[in-house]
Amino acid sequence: MLPGQVAMVPNTALGFLLEGLALWLRASRAGRSPVLASRAAAAMAGLLGLLNLVEYVLDKNLGIDELLFRDPAGLTSVFPGRMAVVTAVGFVALAAALLTLDLRRAPWTSDGLALLSGVLAMVSLTGYSYGVRSLSWIGIYKGMAIHTALGFLVLTVGVLFVHARGLSRLLVSDTAGGVLARRILPVALLAPLLLGWLRIEGEQLGLYGPEVGGALYAVSAAIILTAILLGTAAALMRADEKRRSSEDALRTFSRAVEQSPASIVITDLLGNIEYVNPRFTRVTGYAMNEVLGMNPR
């Protein structure tokens, strides 16, 4: 994608096609057949990543690296056509996340596996942004390509939100926890990366030394964190005040209904009785538990 940077190998592109297909099929919610096809596509992508890890561990070529395209010039590393170790781990983690989407006892399992690939992608992108070559080349072993890292981030977000369970359920909820997460999470992820990049750029331009850069980074991070926390606390305070006001109004209404001199019957949309006030029981002689669920129509 950029001169001198890591290239995406054909097997990595194939892995993205398989896991993208698996995610698309799961998002369709069209029945059991798409789910089975999704699991098959995810399993093939995971197997592809696992076989690449086996090649690294056993130091053997299983014949899959150049199965699609030959690389006689070795443009994709000293192991022509072989995906990076972190890329293979990312595919295995995402495949496992897709295969465990339906776990009911541990709904966070899928989220954790998806986040693993997202973290690997973030580390790689940070290395490119900061110009840290050791994150893209570890000795003779190449790291993750830029567009590979971007692809993993997209797939990670897709897996997290495809069923809105676990972590994603928290992020989309209208509860206080959901509001807090949506306000803090983006800043918590992006602010340290941006501040770190600005610090390095300033030091390289000679604007200040490492000590001053470290102090500026710490102060800036503290200011941003304080601003976010205060803003979030203010939003939660306003929400709590509205909740208390609603509760007070509901209590006032309940007392008015109970103390009303008229008989009051509250029903649901189907006409089934859900509540009667004390005046109704005195006038009719029926206890509340005797009429609950009845339909006077």
Image (cartoon, rainbow, N blue to C red):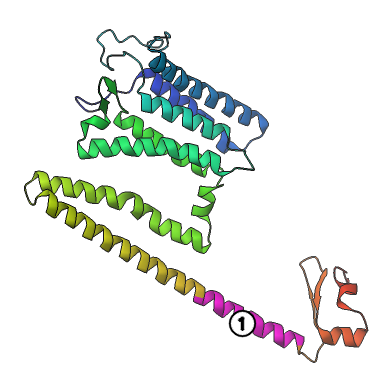
Left or right of 160, for residue 296: right
Q: Is residue 255 magenta?
A: yes
- Extreme left residue here? 206
Residue at x 85% of width, y 71% of height? 292
The answer to whether residue 153 is left or right of residue 288 is left
On the picture, is 93 further left or further right than 219? right
Q: Residues within 10 Å of mark 1 (few under 14, many from 20)?
A: few
Q: In the image, which residues are magenta?
A: 241-258
Q: Position of residue 47 (x, y in %)?
A: 50, 20
Could you say which is closer to the camera, residue 48 or residue 25? 48
Kind of element beneath mark 1: helix
Residue 125: image location, x then y, percent: 29, 37
Q: Is residue 243 above or below residue 43?
A: below
Q: Position of residue 188 (x, y in %)?
A: 35, 53
Taking the spot 29% from the left edge, 23% from the top edge, the residue there is 142
Which quarter shows the N terminus? top left
Main SS of residues in magenta: helix
266 and 287: which one is in front? 287
Q: Is residue 99 visible?
A: yes
Query: Residue 98 sits in which quadrant?
Result: top right
Residue for point 30% across, 10% down = 71
Residue hosting label 1: 249
Q: Is residue 39 left or right of residue 69?
A: right
**Residue drawn 12% across the image and 54% down it:** 212
Residue 15 in picture, x, y percent from top left: 44, 24
